[in-house]
Image (cartoon, helix red, strand yellow):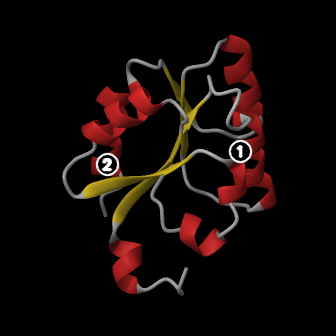
Amino acid sequence: MAAPTVATRLQRRCLLLCADAAQRARLEGALPGDWRATPLREGDALDDFAELLQHRFVLLDLDESEAFDPLDMIERLRGDMMLNVPIFCFGGDAARRDAARLARADRFFERGEIADMLPRFCEQFGW
């Protein structure tokens, strides 16, 4: 990617870490018209810090187990890259949520409620 510009930084985007096509479509459909999601399905795509920093928040599927390890994604974002954008997790059982909380994820939602929360997040991070 080319160096970030003011125009690219002002784009309203969120990072979507979810391999479930139906859930991705549901979440992308819940975004307001001036927002877009950047779907990533493989952990190796988390290499460009300048690109990742341009996203306002991260949506992370804690139920994923085949395409990537959600806890590893949190560790890479928070620990390795020291990225300080909100990480909103959805799905997962109590143990997985506790592990994500210890890895420094921010908020946790049921799989079915995250799409309803997206307009609120977009309003809060719509600067």
Task: Identify the residue at image location x=71%, y=20%.
Answer: 96
Q: Nearer the viewer, residue 55 or 22?
A: 22
How far apart marks 1 and 2 lie (CA) works out to 22 Å
Checking the image for residue 14, the label placed there is none
Helix, strand or loop at label 1? It is: helix
Task: Identify the residue at image location x=76%, y=52%.
Answer: 76
Who comes first in sequence, dot 1 or dot 2? 1
Task: Identify the residue at image location x=33%, y=69%.
Answer: 11
The image quadrant where one finds the C terminus is: bottom left
Disc 1 target residue: 73
- Which residue type does callout 1 highlight? Met
Q: Which of 18 and 91 is in front in this view?
A: 18
Relative vertical location of residue 49 with respect to residue 58 in this rendering, above or below: below
Other-residue count near label 1 (Cα within 10 Å), few / some / many at <14 / 14–19 / ≥20: many
The image quadrant where one finds the N terminus is: bottom right
Image position of 17 (left or right of 28) = right
Helix, strand or loop at label 2? It is: helix
Image position of 49 (left or right of 27) = right
Task: Identify the residue at image location x=65%, y=38%.
Answer: 105
Snapshot quadrant of residue 47? bottom right
Image position of 47 (left or right of 126) = right
Other-residue count near label 2 (Cα within 10 Å), few / some / many at <14 / 14–19 / ≥20: some
Disc 2 target residue: 122
1 vs 2, front mark:
1
Relative vertical location of residue 17 with respect to residue 108 in this rendering, above or below: below
Single out the residue that lies furthest toward the left: 33
Relative vertical location of residue 62 with respect to residue 94 in this rendering, above or below: below
Question: How far across and how far down the image is residue 109, in percent?
Answer: 49, 23
Question: How far across and how far down the image is residue 91, in percent?
Answer: 55, 20
- Which residue type does callout 2 highlight? Cys
